[in-house]
Each structure stands twice: as C-alpha cells, then as structure tokens.
Amino acid sequence: MTVTELSATLPPPGLPGLDPALSRLIEVDGTAADAGSRRTWHVLDTGTALAQRGIDPIGTVIAVHGNPTWSYLWRALVNSSLVRAEAGEPAWRVVAVDQLEMGFSDRTEVRRSLAQRIADLAGLVDALGIRTPIVTIGHDWGGPVSLGWAVHNRERLAGVIALNTAVHHAEGAPLPFPLRVATARGVLAAGTTGTTAFLDTTLALADLDPGVRAAFRAPYSTAARRRGIGGFVADIPATAADESTPALRRLADGLRDLEVPALLLRGPKDPVFLEAHLDDLVRRLPHADVHRYEGAGHLVAEERPYAEAVLDWLAEKVATDVGSPAVRTADTVDTDDIAPAPLWEALSARRDDGEVAVIDMATRSGGAPLRVSWRQLAARVDELAAGLDALGVRAGDRVSLLVPPGPTLTAVLYACLRIGAVVVVADRGLGIRGLSRAVRGAVPDLVIGEVAGLAAARALGWPGRRLSVAALPSAAMRALGVEASLADIARAGRGRVLPSPPPADADAAILFTSGSTGPAKGVVYTHRQLSALRDALAAHFDVGPDTGLVTGFAPFALLGPALGTRSATPDMDVSAPRTLTAAAVAAAVRASDARIVFLSPAAVRNVVATAGALSPDDRAALGRVRTFLSTGAPVGTALLREAQRLMPNATAHTPYGMTECLLVADVTLPEIEDAAASGDRGVCVGAPIGRGRVRIAALDADGRATGAPTTDAGITGEVVLSAPHLKRGYFRLFLTDREATRDLRDLRGRWHRTGDVGHLDAAGRLWIEGRLPHVITTAAGPVTPVGIEQDVEAVAGVARAAAVGVGPVGRQVVVVVLEREPGVRRAGVASAGLTEVVRAATDQRIAAVLVVPTLPTDIRHNSKIDRSRLAAWAARVLAGAKPTAP
C-alpha cells in the first residue's frame, strides 16, 4: 500500500519486525505556533500490550527518531521490552513517536523549529497521560528534541539516552560535509523534498535488508509527504543567526544541570555527528555512561544490538532509582589505600643530580648516544609542564603523544602527568588505520608529534591543537596546522609557577591495546594505578637507583624515571620489535651499565638470531645483566634458553600481563622447567605478583565463562584478576566495561575478566591456554588451542602452529595451520605424510592440517597469532575455496 494523503494514518501491514497491534493514532492539542489546532500523531505504544498481560510498567521510555527516519527505528526496543516484561524483568512502557510532518503523523503547513518540536513533544506526552517516571531516548535530530523535553521536565525525568546526536556545534566550524551539501542553495529542496536523494543517502549509511529499507521509505512516497525532511534540514542551527540556535543553546546549557542517569551510544563511522559532538555531550553530562560501537555508523540502531544494551542499562542504572532522587555513583577506587607517591616523585627527588637518567641509543649527539641527566630531565619536565599550562592545557585535557620512546617522549609524558593532562598513547604498532581509529576515538585536545605523525593528523582529520617536537619552518607549520614547537613551549614555561598536582584518583593515561583480538581499546589508568604499577615493579624486581634498565619494549620504556633508575632505549624501530639486534642490546647495556633488560618476544627472537655478530666486548656487557624480562606474548622455553645463553648470569623472567594490568604474574626459566614436569598443558606464567589475585571462571559446553570464579586447581576457564594497578576502565566503552566485570560483584575489590583462558595448578601457578574467542567447542566439550600447538611445534620442521575450530558452535573440529621450516611458498593442504606426523604428535583429534608461508600476527608484538582470522580462512579452504594467503 502506497500512502499519499497528508493526514495521519497507520503504517501499511507487513513491515518487517513491526507488530501492527502496537500502532495507534492519538489526537493532541497544538501548542506554541500550532495553538488552536488538533494534530494526529502516529506512535508505537506498548502500554496496551502490557495492560493486557497484567503487567504494570515501572516507567515509560519516550523514543524520538531523527531525520529522515520514523518510529520504525525503535522497533527492536519496542519488541525486546515486551519480551523482557513477559519474562518478569523490570517492565518499561515504550512510546516511539512519529514527529509531526514525519513518519505516519499529520503533515501541516506549520514551520516546525526546534523549540516548536520540543513543545509538540510536550503536548503529546501530556495527552498520553503518563504517570510513571520518564526516560527519553533520541537519535539524530531526535536527540535535541528529546533532550529539550528532558531539560524542561526534570521533575518527571528518570534518565536520558542518546544515539548519534549533537546539541552544540563549535562557532565558526563548518557543518559536516553531508549537511553542507544538503543545505546548499538550490540543493535543499531538490535533494530533500523533490527527490528521495537525502532519504536514499541516509539509508545507504547502513547495510539494510531490502525489506527494512523499504519500510523506512514507506512514509515518504511523495514530495508532499517529504516536506518534513526538507523542513528538518532547513532548521539545522548552523550559525548564531539561525532560528533554532537559541533553543539549542538553552537545552545544551541545561544539560549541565541534569543529575539523572545518562547513556550515550555512538557509531563512530558517522559522517554527520562526529567524535567532537560526542565529546561535547560528555562534557555536559560527565556522569554519563558512554559506549562507542566500533565499526558502526549513523544508523547504529540498525547495526548493533542497542536495544539489549538500553534495557540492561535501564535495569541496572535506572530501575532501582525510580521513585527516588537520582544519585551519581562514583567509580570504584582503592580508597582504603594511602595514595602512593606520584609517578614523578623520584624525578623530583633527583632534580639536582648530574648523573645520567636517560640514554637514547638511536639519537646521536657528537657521535655518541644522547644522554640526559636527572637535572636536565627534571628542568625540561618543569618547563614543558609550565609551558603547556600557559598554552591553556588543563587537568583532564587529553594529549595524544605521537613521539617515539626516548628522552623527548619521557619529558613530555611526565610534563603532561604533572599538570593533570591525560596522556593518550597509541603507537605506530597499531598500523596507520588502527592508529587513526584510536586517536580519533580519544578526541585529543592536543596532539604532539613529529612531522610524520603531524602529517597523518592533518591528512586524516584528527582533532586537537597541534605541537611539533622539532622547530619547523613557518610554511611547514602552517601546512601542518602547528601552533608551536616543544622548544617554544619550554621557553614559555621558564620561570612560571606550576599548577597544583592532580589528585591520585584523577585519570592519568589512556593506553591502547594491541588490537590483536579486535579493534584496539583505550585503557584508562589513574595516577594511583600507574604509581601502584611502578611500586609493584620496583619491589618484585628489586629496582634501585643503580640498577639500570634497557627497555626494548615500548610500554615500559617510560618507567625508568618513575623507578628512579637510569634507562636506555636500544637503537631500533620500536614499532617493529623484529628490528632489534643482539649488538644493539649489548651496546645499550654497555652504555647504561644496566642490570635489567626488558624485551618483547618478537625482539628476543631477532636478538637470538643475530647473536653471531656479537663482539667479545658485547658478550662481556651482556654477561653483567642480572635480570632478563620478556612479556607481551608467550615466549617458548627453547627461545628463553637461547636468550639466557647470551646473558649467562641473568635470571630469565616472563612476566604475564596485558594493557589492562601490565603486571599480573611472573615466572623464571628454572620455574618453567620445573613446571614442565607437572604434565599441565599451556604456558606456565607463574604465581601472582605482590597484592595481585587470580581466579578462574570455568567454561561451559559452549565455551563461555559462566562458572563462579575460583582458586581451585585444574579448572580451565577465563582468567579473572585483581591488583592495585588494574586499570580504571575502558575509554567510552561502557558495555565492554560491563562485560569485563560481569558476575564479579560478589568479589571484594576491583576485578577484571581478561579474556585469556587457563587454569591454576596445585602450586597456585597460572597456566595460559589461549584466548576466550579462540576456544574450540567440539562435541566432546571445549578445547583450548595452546596445548595442541605446543605438541605440534615439537615436530621437526614445524616453526609455528595454530589450532583453530571450524564448524558450528558445539560441533567444531580442530584444524591445525602450520608455518614450516624451511618455509613454503603457497598456502594449502598439508601432505598426507606431514598430516600423519602432526596427528601423531597430539592426543587431540585433528580434522585437517594446512600450511601457510606465514601465520598472521598482530603488528605491535609481531607474535600474537590471529586465530580468528585463521579459522575463517581454514573454513573457506576446507569448503573448496582457492587457498590464498590468510
């Protein structure tokens, strides 16, 4: 049925996912410029359905669509709310409206500004006679309409939710490109009303089923019925002179006083509502829970299970407070502990010390490695901190550091921490796409970088003011949008008084994960947690002023000044660990007289491979090392033995940790060799360090970690941990935070689900058996991959192996993918002979063996195998597809 009349009507039958019984028409008295009229609205309303089931709702959700959608956008929320109510969960009445001139509501001759639309919604809510507390949810321009009603009706409000919207656009900033095109003279009427161009463009922002796309188009079949689309676009408040700007400013200012729970959901691939718009909303609603659905776009409600997230949030954050004053809840912090000394304490204590603090082997000064004394470093940190303060950088501002490890990064990092700025660390190891995604998602207020990083920031449209590491010609500064160099900032800070230091529980850093199991996540640390990490390292590895530290692993390259000991970074490309050679490590050890060497697994592999180039002096220097550490990914026992032969007097350690908790457990090579006799499968990573605690949540038949966390030995499941230096949370990933603490509320303190799978043995040692997404769910039960891989890698000629699952959940078969030594040129099915040998090497039944030239790994570590990618590739090959490289 094609709808052509201008009066309100019910939607045509048969629209996918829409229950016609929930549609209703309601007459409402017009308000403001529409006073004296009667307007008919179409709404989706679960009120009658709940009443028929004898269910009393605890509250009402008013859902407001944007342009050019209609109430159909909220069908998942409407349907899921009824399902949950029938299951006995907190019941919410959902009323999804078609705004006037839109959907299947009345078309009129009234020009509807933002203020008018807010008044229209108020009239509808009054006409509905709602008595329960109200939560608003809006998308696109339905965001300002719903939030405008919320600001004016606080006494009735229980919460606010917004999806991809904005309430403020910076003065002088151009509109996003799609809106500039839509509002251009001569385009607006033709593109929005005369044709379906604007509608078509919006619907193309998501991969919609044809039936769903047709349903969204259903109310807009004629130019007369599309007038509201054009009216919405024409009303966009782009300048101070626009009619709706005052109303938008009033509601934006009013949000700062809203104390009710708030939820902000966003699809980052939105060309209209940008990260800056979300950042503005967060500043106005700092207590809001925020989640960015990586990979989703403008029509996030069509791309992600937002309805389940909304209903979970309502049950958790709103249902218990309905009927009582809303209370903001603070993040859990370790308030029982005395705040540790700030991270810069040791640097301040040695500010008059002329001894060497930092050595950069990759930077030469007068033909020798660059050396910076404690006195020079402390002075530089003070100058930069005061200069950044003079520039207007304030506590809580985010500063993205696109600077390689070395003295410059060290000074900038400590300067930012000293004034309370939040440092954003996303290194080149993420790859250009991953790095760009991370930086844009963090919405930095300031970007500090070298020319290459600043050029990328300019080309990729990263937000934030920009500073260059080095002084640049005026033309280059203009081209890159650079305000000043670090030398300029230091000069501006000389002699200035520093601001008060930040409190211990203020955010200090956002460190991005490697992205080896999905898009990189920003991990938020407070000053207290970073200081606790420093203290755990110092205590466990007995670090003192004269210890010395060589760091070929970027995350720990900045901790030397915090630990109060000199540190050296070897001559290498830190974004490519495989570039580190044995001679470079020896040179760094000799230059710093270091007793501790810290390398990533990929770096260790190349160090061992290049040991033949070591001179007698190199070997003598390495012989003075007392502690050797490698972390970031599992390190094989054979590789550890080879590394220790290069450092014969060192104790080899393989600490276990992750970006979320950089130090969890530790084990030495002798302890690994002792544990090998136990018969346990996996990688032994030792016992928890210091005040750290580890438990295991057992796997169910589908490979999910559903068991109660336990310290019982021999139970395989997800590793759950707690430590004083555990991260505060994820940056704008509310749902990820919830999953990371799922079913852990009964445990005292802060706990985290790691996503790693393993078990504890009878001695309390932790064994890692893989990642939760990589568990193979066979008909006989869940199977973890690492033990199988260890068995297969013992076969002569196998360099590396990956065990993956192919098939449906609960009936998967195990497939092994190999790298050979020597390597193969083409990927494909292994020979019958090799397959037979591999099958004989392990007790696990192997369905097939495949070979590849190189197993896919993450960029940062060059060692974490992407088993999910391999599993998909193996499934295609075994189904008959041409075996291209995975």
Image (cartoon, rainbow, N blue to C red):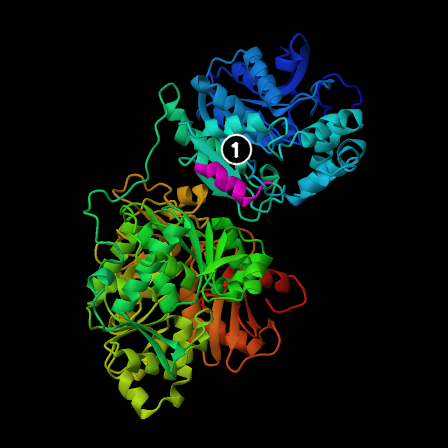
Q: Position of residue 77 (x, y in %)?
A: 55, 30
Q: Is residue 346 above or below residue 619?
A: above
Between 617 and 705, the residue placed more toward the observer is 617
Q: Position of residue 83 (x, y in %)?
A: 52, 27
Position of the N terminus, as image quadrant, is: top right
Q: Is residue 443 above or below residue 674?
A: above
Q: Quadrant of residue 882?
A: bottom right
Between 5 and 370, the residue placed more toward the observer is 370
Give the main secondary structure of the magenta stretch.
Answer: helix
Position of the C terminus, as image quadrant, is: bottom right
Q: How many marks?
A: 1
Query: Is residue 276 located in the magenta-colored stretch of the structure?
Result: yes
Tell me: 145 left or right of 378. Answer: right
Residue range corresponding to the magenta coloring = 273-283
Q: Secondary structure at mark 1?
A: strand
Tell me: 569 left or right of 861. Answer: left
In the image as oriented, which residue stretches furthest toward the top? 36
Which residue is painted at 19% across and 68% down in the image?
A: 544
Q: Quadrant of residue 477?
A: bottom right
Between 133 and 593, the residue placed more toward the observer is 593
* Residue ID for mark 1: 162
Query: Is residue 749 located in the magenta-colored stretch of the structure?
Result: no
